[in-house]
Amino acid sequence: MSKLISGITGRNYQDVYRELSMLREGECYYITKNYATKVKVKYYPLKCVERRSVVDEERLIAVAREHRVSVERLRRVLTLVSKEDFLEALKRKDYRWLARYNLAHVSRGKLSRLGEATAAYYSIDVSQVS
């Protein structure tokens, strides 16, 4: 980045590097093909991004009935645990993490009915996960 800015502006590389390393909150460089300029904006701390998930209600009810779990419990778990996180925990066989959401039995090393329902909702074949 320093090399790019010094090439565009003609300023010394070390000066640009020092200035870049000392940027504060709300400061950045705006770079185009012909020039680069330092921009200062009012700093506003950002909120954490909340995970928004969409749950297919018909599928939710069907899977809950099939695996004999509460629709509300399954809905709550699906909003808390993403498919990627669930799949990663299954691959690592991290039953402690899964047990935090009542998805597995740590002592038995296997999924609970709620965990099996979650896998079915996400179309994950547990026997194929290694």
Image (cartoon, grey):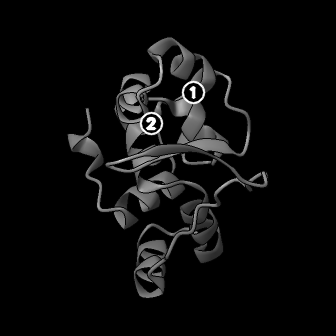
Residue 75 or residue 32, whichever sits in front: 32
Give the labeled residue for mark 1.
Answer: 107
The local crowd at label 1, few if under 14, some if 14 to 19, many if 20 or more residues have their Cα within 10 Å, is few
Quarter of the figure with residue 4: top left
Residue 89: numbered disc: 2
Q: What's the residue type where badge 2 is placed?
A: Ala
Residue 77: numbered disc: none
Residue, x 61% and y 57% (percent of image)?
80
Horizontally, residue 76 falls left or right of residue 86, namely right
Q: Return the disc, 2 or 1, that comes first in the chain's sequence.
A: 2
**Distance between the alpha carbons at the discs numbered 2 and 1:** 16 Å
Horizontally, residue 60 falls left or right of residue 127, namely right
Q: Is residue 33 above or below residue 77?
A: above
Residue, x 38% and y 44% (percent of image)?
87
Quadrant where the C terminus sits is top left
Q: What's the residue type where badge 1 is placed?
A: Ser
Horizontally, residue 76 falls left or right of residue 36, namely right
Say which of marks 2 and 1 sits in front.
2
Residue 67, given in percent of the width and then of the height, sits at 44, 67
Residue 119, given in percent of the width and then of the height, sits at 38, 56
Horizontally, residue 88 falls left or right of residue 44, namely left
The single residue placed furthest to the top in the displayed view is 14
Label 2 SS? helix
Residue, x 49% and y 77% (percent of image)?
55
Q: Is residue 61 above or below residue 113?
A: below
Label 1 SS? loop
Residue, x 49% and y 29% (percent of image)?
94
Residue contact at pointers 2 and 1, CB within 8 angstroms: no
